[in-house]
Image: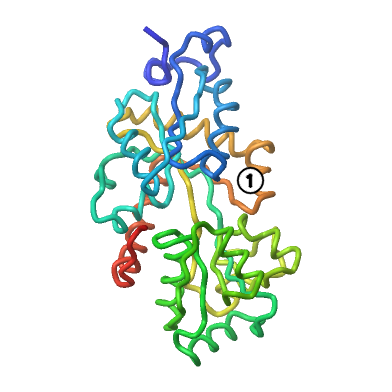
Amino acid sequence: MPFTLARRVLLGAPALPLAARAQTAAPIRFVVPFPPGGLADLLARPLSAWLPQRLGQPVIVENRPGAGGNIGADLVAKAAPDGLTWMIGSIGTLAVNQFLYARMPYETRTAFAPCVLLVNTPKVIAVGKDRPWHSLAALIAAAKARPGALTAGSAGNGTSLHIALELFKRQTGTDITHVPYRGAAAAVTDLVGGRIDLIIDNLPNILPQLREGGARPLAVATPARLPQLPEVPTTAEAGLPSFLFGTWFGLAAPAGTPAPVVARMAEAVTAALQEPEIGGRLREQGAVPGGGTPAQFAAFIAQEAARLEPVIREAGIRAE
């Protein structure tokens, strides 16, 4: 019988088994419910290369995209809780898809054992370089003066950019017209080209344009200023302290996976995220590496779901 992660944790074996043992251990599978090349995939690849030396088992990555991540998530939800199958989950698959889709293939609140937060990509509120607003207060005032006249792009209906916009409108009492695109890149292109007024985007998506002057950042939706944009105020500094938003990814296992197994994986991943070749590269791209315990991640997921459900329902947001 393979000496899997679950058996090793339960038996109390050393954290770093012999390399020879790793060669015969059953492989761990990281299911990525999104296409190759996205952030979830780019997280999974370096982790799959680093973790085998820590866990003593090979790690393989399997992309199962579709339905906003629900196809891959359902595969993990129905997998055996033996410590061999894990999901690179997202704000969608673990928190908000249940409010966006009329029918879900799994019960979000009970299908998974949350393990650890992997990364948070903070949102930045940016306007086109030729627009007259140089502060968040000026943008909000313009939106209030002309209800519905300002346009904001997103990566599509039901995406985190769309939800962030609706949360912003709700908290500022503004009416801004949503313009959905097929992906954030197209929205940023139109922002730079002057065809839309603003975007509330993930920092890694728009950071090159902000640095090159193609768009103007007004505020970052984070508790503290970001090292990538040290001169840009936080939303609290800009007068909107309640607006905090990020797109996040985290690791989860099927419900019923033994708690010691989940805790051991959380410890290993937290250590990996502290390595320069993993955590350092994420910071360079404008992301914030995660880490922590399963309990912390479970509480974070519950908080995000409770915070965003009324926004989604009141705005009538539905996934494409």
In this view, the residue farthest toward the bottom is: 145
| Residue 179 in picture, x, y percent from top left | 47, 71
From the viewer's perspective, tell me whether residue 203 is left or right of residue 104: right
From the viewer's perspective, tell me whether residue 315 is left or right of residue 135: left
Q: Is residue 162 above or below residue 83?
A: below
Q: Residues within 10 Å of mark 1 (few under 14, many from 20)?
A: many
Q: Residue at x 48, y 51 (%)?
A: 248
Visible in this render: residue 177? yes
- Secondary structure type for disc 1: helix
Q: Residue at x 57, y 75 (%)?
A: 196
The way the protein has been coloured in the rendering is: rainbow
In this view, the residue farthest toward the right is: 212
Q: Residue at x 35, y 55 (%)?
A: 96
Quarter in which the N terminus is drawn: top left
In this orientation, which residue lies closer to the viewer: 199 or 311? 199
| Residue 108 in picture, x, y percent from top left | 28, 46
| Residue 2 in picture, x, y percent from top left | 40, 10
Number of numbered labels in the structure image: 1
> Residue 167 lies in what quarter of the image?
bottom left
In this orientation, which residue lies closer to the viewer: 146 or 286? 146
In this orientation, which residue lies closer to the viewer: 51 or 190? 190
Visible in this render: residue 222? no
Which residue, given by chain and number where applicable, does mark 1 sit on?
282
From the viewer's perspective, tell me whether residue 132 is left or right of residue 290: right
Q: Is residue 58 above or below residue 131?
A: above
For the residue marked with disc 1, what is the amino acid?
Leu
| Residue 61 in picture, x, y percent from top left | 49, 29
Quarter in which the C terminus is drawn: bottom left
> Residue 223 lies in what quarter of the image?
bottom right
In this orientation, which residue lies closer to the viewer: 246 or 293? 246
